[in-house]
Image (cartoon, helix red, strand yellow):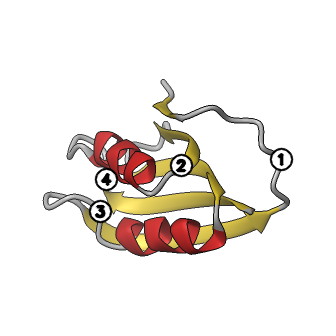
Amino acid sequence: MVRARIVVRGVVQGVFFRASMREEARRLGLSGWVRNLPDGESVEAVVEGEGEAVERLICWALRGPPAARVKELRVELKPYRGEFRGFEIRY
């Protein structure tokens, strides 16, 4: 089990990135959250789950939903904590 903090920059706000990531994370059986950052061009997520599923979500985040234009993706791997139930959008 792993935990990752993901920050995606580009055209990722206002294009259903958060809702699409929530759907993909749930499909992969991951838990955590996703939110827009105040800079207007970034989305941050913290995800936990099986290593392969987290890798798949990271690969998905490289492109995101159809209207997104990802310019940069940063990933920090962290120790698994098991603190989340489900996957949510935070505001």
Q: Which residue is mark 3?
A: 64
Q: Position of residue 5 (x, y in %)?
A: 65, 57
Label located before the other in sequence (4 or 2)? 4
**Horizontal arrangement in the rendering, residue 36 relative to residue 71 (left or right):** right
Q: Residue at x 14, y 61 (%)?
A: 66
Q: Which residue is mark 1?
A: 81
Q: Amino acid at mark 4?
A: Val
Q: For the residue labelled by badge 3, is the local secondary structure a helix, a strand or a loop?
A: loop
Label located before the other in sequence (3 or 2)? 2
User: Label 3 crowding class (10 Å Cα cut-off): few <14, some 14-19, many 20+?
Assistant: many
Q: Quadrant of residue 64?
A: bottom left
Q: Quadrant of residue 69?
A: bottom left
Label located before the other in sequence (1 or 3)? 3
Q: CA distance from mark 1 to mark 3?
A: 26 Å
- Quarter occupied by the N terminus: bottom right
Above or below for 46 versus 87: below
User: Label 1 crowding class (10 Å Cα cut-off): few <14, some 14-19, many 20+?
Assistant: few
Q: CA distance from mark 3 to mark 4?
A: 8 Å
